[in-house]
Amino acid sequence: MVHHLIADSIVKHRGSRAILTDIALSCKTGEIVGVLGRNGSGKTTLLEIIYGVLNCEHKYLAVDGVKVNHLYSLRQTINYLPQHRFIPPYLTVSKAITLFLENDIKQAIYKDDIILSLTDKKIKELSFGDLRYLEIMLILSSPSKFTLLDEPFQGLAPITVERIQKLITKASQHRGIIIVDHNYHTVLELSNKLYILQESCLHPLKDLSELQNFDYLV
């Protein structure tokens, strides 16, 4: 069954400044939707509003035609990788996996060689790259119809980026993924549907050459 997520009529201001103006975006299972935009353009704000943890003046969110105000409250409907760390630093990697994943899924994640090498370490002992890899593995391994990824590639080595690309592509076979990242080359490679966020407006892109019209050169 194909599931559909619709975000429409999203409006957000900070003071008198328009951050998001009448935003419309859609995603269905099997799609990787890339959202491009410069620093401060509102990409993270958009993801937080879709997930339901940030208020805005107006929004319409629906899954499979049913209106929803707080998507995060719907079990196995959506999950979210924020920019900041979300795993308590005092946990060991193995404990974090136990808390976040069901037993059958947990066994699969231990087949990953990077994860297997980290199991006895505490979260606070991990390098930035290893921690981010673990976070992404947990998010993509958790059952969900949709996943929001905020800057998953930021600060990572090319070899790690390549591994995560493969994880995202595999996960997208059974879920819809919305991804924003400054590593736009990787977003372009992964995505089969693209938008660009500029001057508070979200524009669908039919062709990569359209990026030049927004002074977003590749």
Image (spheres, rainbow, N blue to C red):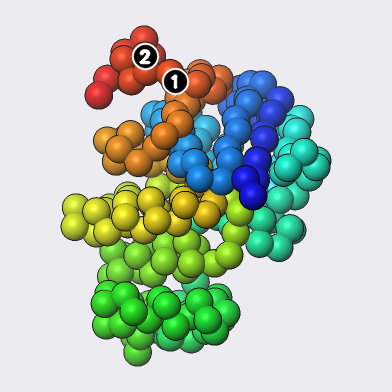
How many numbered discs sit on the rendered protein? 2
The answer to whether one can see residue 94 in this image is yes
Residue at screen point 43% across, 18% down: 206
Q: Nearer the viewer, residue 58 or 30?
A: 30
Q: Residue 87 at x, y = what percent?
A: 49, 72
Mark 1 and mark 2 in contact? Answer it, CB < 8 Å. Answer: yes
The answer to whether one can see residue 15 in this image is no
Q: Quadrant of residue 118?
A: bottom left
Disc 2 is placed on an element classified as helix
Residue lying at the far top of the rendered structure: 213
Residue identifier under label 2: 210
Asked if residue 156 is positioned above or below residue 9 in the image, the reply reads below
Q: Residues within 10 Å of mark 1 (few under 14, many from 20)?
A: some
Q: Residue 11 at x, y = what percent?
A: 69, 27
Q: Quadrant of residue 192?
A: top left
* Structural distance between the alpha carbons of marks 1 and 2: 7 Å
Which quadrant would the C terminus be assigned to in this image? top left
Residue at screen point 33% across, 34% down: 188
Residue at screen point 58% across, 41% down: 28
Name the amino acid, label 2.
Answer: Glu
- Whichever of callouts 1 and 2 sits on the residue coming sooner in the sequence is 1
Disc 1 is placed on an element classified as strand
Q: Residue 105 at x, y = what percent?
A: 50, 77
Residue identifier under label 1: 205
Q: Locate residue 51 relative to residue 166 in the image: left or right.
A: right
Residue lying at the far front of the rendered structure: 1
Q: Residue 76 at x, y = what percent?
A: 66, 62
Q: Nearer the viewer, residue 158 or 215?
A: 158
Name the amino acid, label 1.
Answer: Leu
Residue at screen point 31% across, 75% down: 112
Q: Locate residue 158 relative to residue 62 in the image: left or right.
A: left
